[in-house]
Amino acid sequence: MKRFHVHLHVDDLNRSIGFYTQLFAAQPARVEGDYAKWMLEDPPVNFAISTRGNKPGIDHLGIQTDDAEELAALKARAEAADMALLDEGTTTCCYARSEKHWITDPQGVAWEHFHTLGSIPVFNEAAPATGTAACCATAPRSKSCC
């Protein structure tokens, strides 16, 4: 199964957690000091918010897969369509270790295809835990994360 992924930057995490908890009628699956994530089943969405961006709004969209085979199929489809692809392989971001690659749509919107391998205790192992820079915003243009 695949799950749609949306990551938004927000100004006020607690206020946004309250809003989305009401909107989804569900508590977040994970909450950190700068991040929250809902793993919704109906519709199947991985919805994340963080305070790490430069301005509020959509950071990126994506597709989360349940297994490596689904991820490989998405990658093959992107390559067959001759889309520019950034293959990060195994990396960390958003409190998770994942296998991932990125593509960018014609408007410049980043699309992440990923398979989550496990949870980690920090936002990104490559960056200081106290940093406020977004890891996802520049992913298609540089080796980043999320």
Image (cartoon, rainbow, N blue to C red):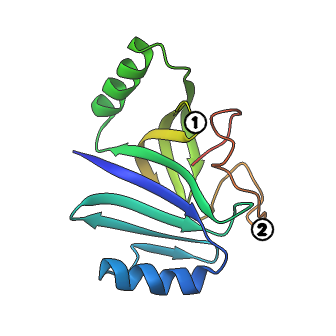
Q: CA distance from mark 2 to mark 1?
A: 32 Å
Q: Secondary structure at mark 2?
A: loop
User: Can you tell which of label 2 and label 1 is closer to the viewer?
Assistant: 1
29 vs 142: above or below:
below
Label whose residue precedes the other's in the sequence (2 or 1): 1
Query: Which x, y percent locates residue 104?
Result: 55, 32
Near mark 2 (Cα within 10 A), the count class, few <14, some 14-19 or many ≥20, is few
Residue type marked 2: Thr
Towards the viewer: 67 or 81 = 81
Residue topped by disc 2: 130
Residue type marked 1: Gln
* Residue 129 placement, left or right of 63: right
98 vs 9: above or below:
above
Towards the viewer: 136 or 129 = 136
* Residue 112 placement, left or right of 137: left
Label ID, residue 107 = 1
Query: Which x, y percent locates residue 134?
Result: 70, 55
User: What residue is shown at x 64% (from left), y 39% (from top)?
Assistant: 139
Give the image quarter of residue 123.
bottom right
Extreme-front residue of the structure: 107
Query: Which x, y percent locates residue 4?
Result: 34, 50
Near mark 1 (Cα within 10 A), the count class, few <14, some 14-19 or many ≥20, is few
Q: Are marks 2 and 1 in contact (CB under 8 Å)?
A: no
User: What residue is shown at x 56% (from left), y 41% (from top)?
Assistant: 109
81 vs 129: above or below:
above
110 vs 125: above or below:
above
Give the image quarter of residue 138.
top right
Query: Which x, y percent locates residue 17?
Result: 49, 81
User: What residue is shown at x 75% (from left), y 53% (from top)?
Assistant: 127
